Amino acid sequence: MVPNAERVRFMKTGEDANSANVRIARAYTKRDMILMSGYHGYPDWFSTEDSPNNGVPAFMKEYVKIIRGELRRGGRLIKRYGERIACVISIAYDSTRIRAAHTSGSSVRRQGARHPAGSGRSADGISAGKRGRPGVLGVDADLAGYAKAMANGFPLSAYVGRAEYMETLYRSG
């Protein structure tokens, strides 16, 4: 059902799963910056838009770049910051805007795949989970998070990924 799920870890919330994926991508790539599209929880690195007025330190804006609206912006950000990007995180599927979210996520993933920077791709499937038949979303991310739909609203989430990324959890020093 989830082609990239060579390793799986369980948590309580979707925010936990997304945060773990960002941390793994940063550890794996040895880079700090993330590009994001959509809402992925409320830790500091996903809440930089209004900083510092919302309590998030202004320096976080240097590490998080937000892809808004047009898809070409994602490609421009990848070209501009390529060697600094740890991962691109996007919503794989949004049941309220199915076509827009799927198209946006696919475009960002294609841009990331073409770029030689080697940044990870993280899909946020928190609300969508695995609704639909296998492969329907075309998501082939290095890391992914699942929660709400997976647990029917109960506090359970999972972050999954390719073995080479997930094994970063076990490396020391």
Image: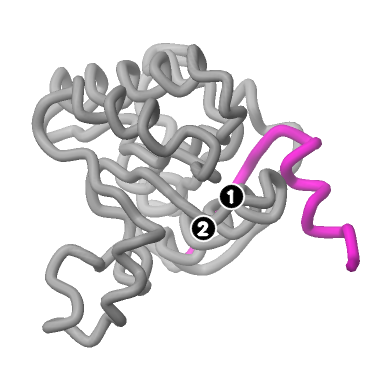
Location of mark 1 (residue): 159
Check disc 2: other Cα within 10 Å, few if <14, some if 14-19, many if 20+.
many
Check disc 1: other Cα within 10 Å, few if <14, some if 14-19, many if 20+.
many
Left or right of residue 32: residue 30: right
Location of mark 2 (residue): 17
- Residue 14, percent from left and from top: 42, 59
Q: Are marks 1 and 2 in contact (CB under 8 Å)?
A: yes
- Residue 35, percent from left and from top: 36, 44
Q: Quadrant of the C terminus?
A: bottom right
Q: Nearer the viewer, residue 29 or 2?
A: 29
Number of marks in picture: 2
Looking at the picture, does residue 41 appear above or below residue 139? below
Residue ranking furthest to the bottom: 55
Q: Amino acid at mark 2?
A: Ala
- Mark 1 secondary-structure assignment: strand
Left or right of residue 90: residue 94: left
Color scheme of the displayed model? one colour
What are the residue bounds of the magenta stretch?
156-173
Q: Quadrant of the N terminus?
A: top right
| Residue 168 belongs to magenta span | yes
Q: Residue at x 25, y 67 (%)?
A: 47
Q: CA distance from mark 1 to mark 2?
A: 5 Å
Looking at the picture, does residue 82 appear above or below residue 113? below
- Residue 67, percent from left and from top: 22, 39
